[in-house]
Amino acid sequence: MEWITLILTVCIVIISFRLLFGKRSHPNAPPCIRGWIPWFGAAFEFGKAPLHFIQQARAKYGPVFTVVAAGKRLTFVTLNEDFRAFFTSKDVDFEQAVQEAVHNTASISKDCFYKTHPTCATVIKGRLTPGNTAMLSVHLCEEFNDHLENLGSEGSGQLNEIINVMYPAVMSNLLGRCNSPNNALTRQEFLEKFTTYDEGFEYGSQLPDMFLKQWANSKQWLLSLLRNMAIRSQETLYNENDGKTLLQHLATAISDKYLPNYGLLLLWASLANAIPITFWAIAFILANPELWIVNIVLVCLLCIQDKEKTKVTLDDLQHMPYVKWCIMEAIRLRAPGAITRKVVRPLKLQNYVIPPGDLLMLSPYWAHRNPKYFPDPEDFKPERWEKADLEKNVHLEGFVAFGGGKNQCPGRMSVPLGYLHQDWHKKVHCCYHQELYQGVI
């Protein structure tokens, strides 16, 4: 009898889940990949290799398809002609799409997020306007200068060694000098905790902490760190000579209770995106000798104009558009993650009707490999960006790395900081070996 009861219970649970997910279907809904395990759906297949899974699903089911995974319906949009509706339709919502992920990754309550997100976004966008970015760049250069000296002027090493010096420099820039790791031991501990948090971020955004204990421990460690940073930033509000930091500006819009939580998201968004892209930009350039020579010549010319100069300003960068093109091309090829919106009312795309509750998904990785907009999409070709107007944040058609609509990534304003990262490394390299390149110039 016990076996019969167990089998009946399992059958009832399976049928219940089928009914739960089936009732949300629409007669004209996109093709759906459900898998056979209740709730998990196709999560295991999708999680093994998401990009490969998306590519295969598009080839089999067409440009719009739904994946049931971990209790959610993910509807992927892959055609450029549908991106405008994705970003601007009133039938989709950004805040509802990311609220659960924000709660899981930074422990911010639902009510707090809906109440404070609009104000926070306004504060961050205001601080990352071109005018404010120009002021931030001077301080960032000084920080890079200090930390790069620790690497020495001779010898060889891993590219990551150069990239890692960006962490304390960027932290000082955003959170204040008092909050930058000030010795090798604390930097290493922070790097280990942050790396664990960053690498598990996608899983942590979807699953409860109980399934990801090491990741959850790193999250709590970082939150504790940010609490102390928030206290120090308020104590030094009028003691530092660089004006208010972004964290201090954020404190005007958020209560003390959740300031560390938003600070963690700010820190992650800054370190987990701009720095890896800088790594890839340098790697792509070094892997293409002809591009490497072009960039070295540009920066050496800048060095020769003023040999005593220790800062690269945004005005200097205006005279080196090729460097910007290299950064944008690296972003195109290595744009991470996915962009999402939640469907709040039936949404028509192609010949389908996407039901409310679905999460609309867009993959920048595959969007940027559309040969219609990016010929030879797998090749690193900075010159393709000559057609864009980067001064006015007008990118190439088909480029979606910064999102779209009213909820574009505010960090797009600070992309010149990314240019500055790369230029500074090139300048340092150039100044140490200037004689070597005299013949080139």
Image: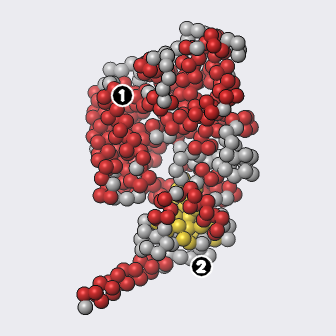
* Residue drawn where x is 30% and y is 89% of the image: 4
Name the residue nearer the viewer: 422 or 140. 422
Q: Say which residue appears at 65% left-offset and 49% top-offset.
A: 368
Picture coordinates of residue 89, whole percent (x, y): 60, 59
Q: What is the x, y in percent for residue 3?
A: 28, 87
Along the horizontal axis of the image, is 262 left or right of 302? Answer: left
Q: Quadrant of residue 14?
A: bottom left
Front in this rendered view, residue 398 or 405: 398
Name the spot of residue 355 as percent of width and height, x first. Answer: 54, 70
- For label 2, the residue is 27
Which label is found at residue 400? none
Image quadrant holding the N terminus, namely: bottom left
Q: Residue at x 36, y 21 (%)?
A: 240
Relative to 2, does residue 359 appear above or below in the rendering? above
Q: What kind of residue is marked 1?
A: Ser
Classify mark 2: helix, strand or loop.
Answer: loop
Mark 1 = which residue? Answer: 180
How dense is the environment of label 2, judged by Cα within 10 Å: few (below 14), some, or many (20 and up)?
few
Q: Which of 68 and 110 is in front in this view?
A: 68
From where the camera sits, is residue 321 visible? no
Q: How crowded is mark 1: few (under 14 residues within 10 Å), some or many (20 or more)?
A: some
In terms of secondary structure, where does tag 1 sit?
Answer: loop
Q: Are marks 2 and 1 in contact (CB under 8 Å)?
A: no
Would you say residue 367 is visible in this rendering? Answer: yes
Residue type beneath disc 2: Pro
